[in-house]
Image (cartoon, coloured by chain):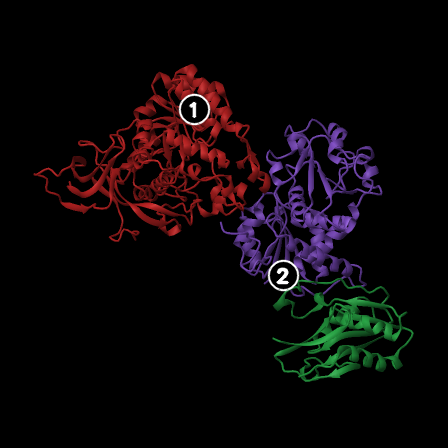
Chain colours: A purple, B green, C red
Amino acid sequence: MGGNPQLDEQGALRHLLTIDGLPRQTLVQILDTAESFVAVNEQEVRKVPLLRGKAIFNLFFEPSTRTRTTFEIAAKRLSADVINLNIGTSSQSKGETLLDTVDNLAAMQADMFIVRHAQSGAAHMIARHVAPHIHVVNAGDGRHAHPTQGLLDMFTIRRYKSAFHNLRVAIVGDVLHSRVARSQIHALTTLGVPEVRVVAPKTLLPVDVAQMGVHVFHDMVAGLRDVDVVIILRLQNERMRGARLPSTQEYFHYYGLTPEKLACAKPDAIVMHPGPMNRGVEIDSRVADGGQSVILPQVTFGIAVRMAVMSILAGNS
Amino acid sequence: MTLPDAETLIQQLADIIRPDMTPNMVLVGMHTGGVWAAQRLHPLLDAGMPHGSLDISFYRDDFGQKGLHPTVKPTHLPFEVEDRDILLVDDVLFTGRSVRAAMNALFDYGRPQRIRLAVLIDRVEDRQLPIAADYVGAALQVPATQHIHLIQQENKTLMLKLVNL
Amino acid sequence: MMKIHLQGGRIIDPQSGLDRLGNVCVADGKIVAIGEQPPDFVADRVIDARGLCVCPGLVDLSVRLREPGNEYRATLASEMRAACAGGVTTLACPPDTEPPLDEIGLIEMLKFRAKSLHLSKVYPVAALTQKLAGERLTEMAELRDAGCIGVSQADAGLVDNQVLMRALEYAATFDITVWLRPQDVYLSRGGVAHDGVVAARLGLPAIPLAAETIAVMTILLLARETGARVHLCRLSSAMAIQMVRHAKAEGLSVTCDISIQHLHLSEIDIGYFDPNCHLVPPLRSLRDRDAIRTALADGTIDAVCSDHTPVDDDAKLLPFGETEPGASGVELLLALTLKWAAETGAPLAKALGTVTYQPARIMGVPAGQLAVGAAADLCVVDLAQWWRVDATSLKSQGKNTPFFGYELCGKVRYTLVDGLMAFEANQHGLSDS
């Protein structure tokens, strides 16, 4: 099915669907551009006229207030017109197909779709289908990818650690079901992080995860030893039903990030979490609110990174 | 045609700006050439004067045609813009569109009391907007097929160069 | 009835090992001569077969005709025309229609409708359990008498091993072949791709190898216990094939087939969520694919089938996991089998055997051979003609195949069923209009 569907014939970014397969220079360009938008967000008027007159549709087939809001703020700070659609509750339940919905919105002169969907590959499918002038940003598809989250995490790491080439990063938790983890792994390896670890019980790891270029740990103390960055993933409650875990209590005991376990990491290690957090399940409040946590800055940087992505895409027409 | 020496123009600019200086004045260079020019002017005017840099990529009116500039630089204004007397510095004043973008950008940081514009070169024939510089190093007529670039050499001194499009 | 003289072709009969230049004469629906033209034979039509290959019509173990119940996807007429264009003169259709083929009335209607088209010969495989629900047995002896060549659960799976064991015992009583696609219903639940590196990367819900191997082991143990004759459909993994190899060596009455997709493709071909690679069973690793290619050569795998599954565009224009699995393939069976032979160095006759007499034996029908006195079900093939797979080159209503864009070698020029011209490419032989 052809080459990388995210890039146009000149190799410029047309859609952002996944970090998998993107060149390092593209990631760096996004991060560098985001630095400029951090400055914009500190202006008195936190708004630039870049996307004036552009119509950006937030197409959320799966509910998410947080991600949708950060995209909305980012688009508004770029002066775009933002239209929010929670489709899970409207036409999809009336039998309209996904592509019918997309076609209808495209007919309303859309310039960009921000798509979230419960199925892996949904954003790719929409990107293949839309007219050439429409850009698609994947805001999370199933277990596959959440590239803007991955990028904002890289932005955060670069802000606190300044370089990637000398880091040890541990991702802890439900990698199997996590689109965030997949995007982080691709971003970290593309940006040259020499050692990326995943730490989880076998039931929460894909069988061939090592082939994605990560080191697998089942013991958290060993997995956190001497790392510079600890990324904690959210644990969904449904995992208890699929026989993947016995209880949240046992999970917290072995894989919850406590100050004691964090002490195995480097003293200046930072702690990240894509949110929303389950305190007492995957992370102890003392860590979440502690001095090594950069969880709130992640949210702030998320707006700048999404502004960067939208403005780069809209400019590649 | 031979271009004037950039270092001489900097000296001349400093000389004509100096009488108009106020205690409320800040220096703002526009990326990239204007930042270099402002850095050279700064010690000649007043080494204690606050100075910053401005990237206008997000305010350009050719975004729809050219997209985002691949090397956007952060804007760095380490002072309040509100009620300041701003001396905006650019290398070449051409169509006037960059200055328009720069003024829009400055107003998003606050309401300055006054903005004045200093440029090394003024291509006065090519203006497309009602914009004029307050301080000009040299006024030149250049064919529309040519650009004037400011170059920073390894020893940090500046040089003007003519480039064919 | 028309007498046809196929003149000067390369005649290949994989079963007898015949491979010679000569003539094939057809009269009254049967082959009357192979080699020399009988002196008294006066043809109504002479077909110049010089430079072409005359071989038995292909036998395809799995072609979904989408009738009854799914006529919006494809019809008997459209898919049987596609079959004839692919040189397939005999085909088995699985029981997963709507309603499933679990009653004699449905079988008779299907056979009658198929027969009236005068195209390929259709042999239904009846449902093993009523409504394919996996609970109550169908009247399989009567279904056999009505013309079904076996019983199957198709892709519906069978949860209850007690039902499976009883079904095998009952089928063995009447010497009916049980066709089973091995799949542990629980282990494959919710999965859409092989549990390997691609599913890990794309975040697709995965189906582990054990979903197939556990089921194969269960079936083989119960087949030994009950003495039933079992045909394993669409194997996808190296380990399952190894189990079959052992079972055959033990003398168990077991056969198996694979699809053309699994003969050539692996999980890697999913690329960026190509919905045409959403298949059942899933495309496995390259290692599995290579094991399939080897096992076809060494005879462990008895037959190659198209597993033809026309799917309408709407059902493929969805996120990968929501798309309907399956690929259209009856027109690709020949060329893709030849491609395997060309790539592995397998002899032509051996390759043709896997799509002619070998599947015919599994079905238990007299087909897939060239013999004097046998039905004139044959095709004339240009083995050297390259063609490109695209939506316009396929007659099937299902324009869904992972092989779009492939350049394949080997194209059917003429297909005869019972001595009647069922397909004829246009005079240039490039494509017919």
Which is nearer the eye, C36 or A280? C36
Q: Is residue C111 visible?
A: yes
Q: Indicate the quadrant where residue C176 lies.
A: top left
The residue to which callout 1 is attached is C244
Which is nearer the eye, C269 or C73? C269
User: Which residue is painted at 21% across and 45% down in the image?
Assistant: C49
Which is nearer the eye, A94 or C120? C120
Q: Indicate the quadrant where residue A184 lies.
A: top right
**C14 relative to A243 in the view: left or right:** left
Where is residue C317? Give x, y as percent. Answer: 50, 48
Does C95 sit above or below residue A120?
above
Q: Amino acid at mark 2?
A: Ala
Callout 2 secondary element: helix
Furthest residue toward top: C225
Characterize the local packing of mark 1: few (<14), some (14-19) or many (20 or more) Cα atoms within 10 angstroms: many
Split into 4 quadrants, where in the image is the C terminus of chain A? bottom right
The residue to which callout 2 is attached is A314
Q: Amino acid at mark 1?
A: Val
